[in-house]
Each structure stands twice: as C-alpha cells, then as structure tokens.
Amino acid sequence: MTNERLKLIKEMLETNPDDSFLKYAAALEYEKDGNRKQAIVTIRDLLANDANYLGAYYKLGRLLEEEGKEKEAIKIYRQGLEVSKKISDLKTEGELTEALMLLGADDDITWA
C-alpha cells in the first residue's frame, strides 16, 4: 500500500523544499511506514536548515534511541536543550531534560 499522505507531502516539498513543517511531516510518515532510517535523514536535514525547530530534536533523539544509538540521542537532546534555553521554551526544555534523565545523562544539566 502506498502512503498517500507521504506522496502529497513530497509533492508539496518540491514546491517548498525548505519548509520545516513539511520536512517534519515527511519524517513522521517515514516513521509510520517503518522507514526509521529515512525519518532520521529527513529530520537531520530539517535541523541543518532550521536549528530552531524544537520538536525535531526530541523526535530525532527518540528515533536514534530506537536504533540503539543512545550516545547520538544524548547529543541531539543536549543540542535541543541549548536551543530551547536560548529561546526560553520551557515546555521543550522540560521534555528534553526528562529524555536525558531517562538515559542517565542529566548529570551536567544546569537548572535555572
């Protein structure tokens, strides 16, 4: 079965290749289809072009964890944590801090 939603998103990306929301949506569809590796590639591309797209850090970290790449996930969570602190997004800061705590990597987190 083809994923019609992914097909539509790809068509929209042809017109708007730098649209972060569309890239994130495509990554979610790749994940839904079981193509975790393409989801990871897509989110990495998104973050390379839009480092402030905060939701992508958590999703990428989770995907990396599912691939057994905890050290990479920790790195991504920490990058997202720094961005969330810079733009004062407390919700995302909390989510990323919790993700780091669950991986036992919260020893160097500074609390404001």
Image: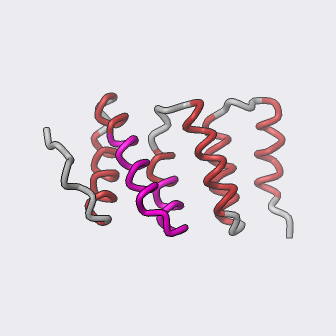
* Residue lying at 80% horizontally and 61% vertically, measured from the top left: 3
Q: As rendered, which of 21 and 45 lies closer to the eye?
A: 45
Secondary structure mainly formed by the magenta segment: helix
Which quarter of the image is occupied by the N terminus?
bottom right
Q: Is residue 6 above or below residue 50?
A: below
Q: In this view, does 27 lie above or below 70?
A: above
89 vs 34, left or right, is left
Picture quadrant where residue 20 is located = top right
Verify whether residue 52 appears in magenta: no
Q: Is residue 7 above or below residue 22?
A: below
Which quarter of the image is occupied by the C terminus?
top left
12 vs 66, left or right, is right
Residue 71 placement (x, y as % from top left) = 41, 58
15 vs 22, left or right, is right
Picture quadrant where residue 102 is located = bottom left
* Residue lying at 55% horizontally and 67% vertically, measured from the top left: 67
Q: Give the range drawn in magenta.
A: 60-81
Q: In this view, does 3 lie above or below 75?
A: below
Residue situated furthest front in the rendering: 71
Residue 52 placement (x, y as % from top left) = 46, 32
Residue situated furthest left in the rendering: 112
Residue 89 placement (x, y as % from top left) = 32, 37
Q: As rendered, which of 71 and 39 lies closer to the eye?
A: 71
26 vs 1, left or right, is left
